[in-house]
Image: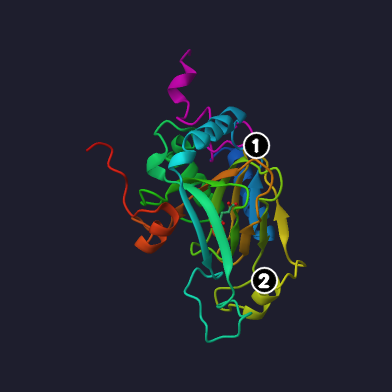
Amino acid sequence: MLHTVSDTLPTYADVVDLTRYPIHRLDSDEGRALINNCRCVLAQDGCCTLPGFLQPIAVAEMVQLANRLERSAWVSNNRHNVYFEAFDNSVEPHHPLAHQERSAKHGIAYDQIPDQAPLRRLYESDDLTRFIAAVLEKSVLFRSADPLDALQITRFHPGEELGWHFDRSEFSVTVMYQRAEEGGDFEYVPELRTKQDERHDDVTKVLQGDRSRITVQSAAPGTLAFFQGNCAMHRVTLVKGSLPRINSVLTYGEHENMRLNDLTSQLFYGRTSPASAEL
Ligand SMILES: O=C(O)CCC(=O)C(=O)O
Ligand SMILES: [Fe+2]
C-alpha cells in the first residue's frame, strides 16, 4: 500500500539523527539497544554522551538563534558555595560550606525561544521525555512547568564559567551547540557524595586542586549528555578565546508543576515570570 511518509514523521524529524538514535521507536530492537547502552554507560561513568544526536542543520539554527538573542540574555555573575546555599562562616575557611565559587553566564529563558526553534520542538515532544525516562529508569517523568527554566540556552562568553557545584535535581540533560576556542570544558567527579554522606573532606580535596578523580569532557556540537549532577560535583571551566560556549539544559522532574523558586529565577533570568507577549 502506498502512503505518504510525512504523515508519520515526528515533529522533530529534522532535528535528531533518528537513524543513529531511534527515539521515535523505543520498542524496536534498535530502540531497546539504545536505551540499554545509555543505562550501562551512565551506571559505569555517571555520565553518558550521545555524539551527533542533533542534525548539523539544527545545531547551526540554534547557534544563529542564540546569537540573535544575545542582547536579551540575562547576564549573571555570582559567588556561591558548591551547594548553592548561604555561606557558613562558622566553619573553617576551606570547608565546602564556606568555600566560594564563581558562576558567570548569559541566560536565555524558555519564553524567549520561539515555538519553531529546533530544540523547543524536540523538548516538547513526548518521545524525548519517554526516552529520557527510559534511560533513567523512571516510570514517570515530567517536563518542568517553569516558564523560564524548563528549557534555556546558556552562553558562556570569554571570561565566564560555572563554578563547582552539585545540582539540586538528581540528573541533568544538556545539548551542546558551540564549543569555546579554549576552556569551557565540562569537568565532573562521579559519586563524590552520596545521598547519605556529604563527604566534605573529599569535596575539599577537589576544591583545593586535587584532579585525580576528575573526568574532563569537551562535547562536540550536537552532543546530548545525561549526567547525575546531584552526587557528581561538576563545573564548566573558564572560557577563553573569542567564541562563546553555547548549550542548553533541559529540565525534567518526577513531579508535575516543577518550578524554580523566585530567588533562583531572579538570579539566572533577572525575573520570576514570563514577559507578557502583548500589552
Ligand atoms: O553547561 C554544562 O555543561 C553544565 C551545566 C550545569 O551544570 C548546570 O546548569 O547546572
Ligand atoms: Fe550543574
Write the residue at 41% across / 44% down: 110
- Element class at badge 2: helix
Residue 243 seen in render: yes
Number of numbered discs: 2
Foreground pick, 56 / 208: 208
Write the residue at 48% across / 72% down: 85
Does the magenta portion include 244? no
Foreground pick, 226 / 151: 151
Residue placed under numbered mark 2 in the picture: 207
Residue 16 seen in render: no
Foreground pick, 137 / 233: 233
Give, as a single range, the part of the protein colored magenta.
Answer: 1-26
- Furthest-left residue in this view: 279
Foreground pick, 110 / 72: 72
Decide whether the magenta segment is chiefly helix, strand or loop.
Answer: loop
Mark number, residue 52: 1
The amino acid type, in three-letter code, at marker 2 is Leu
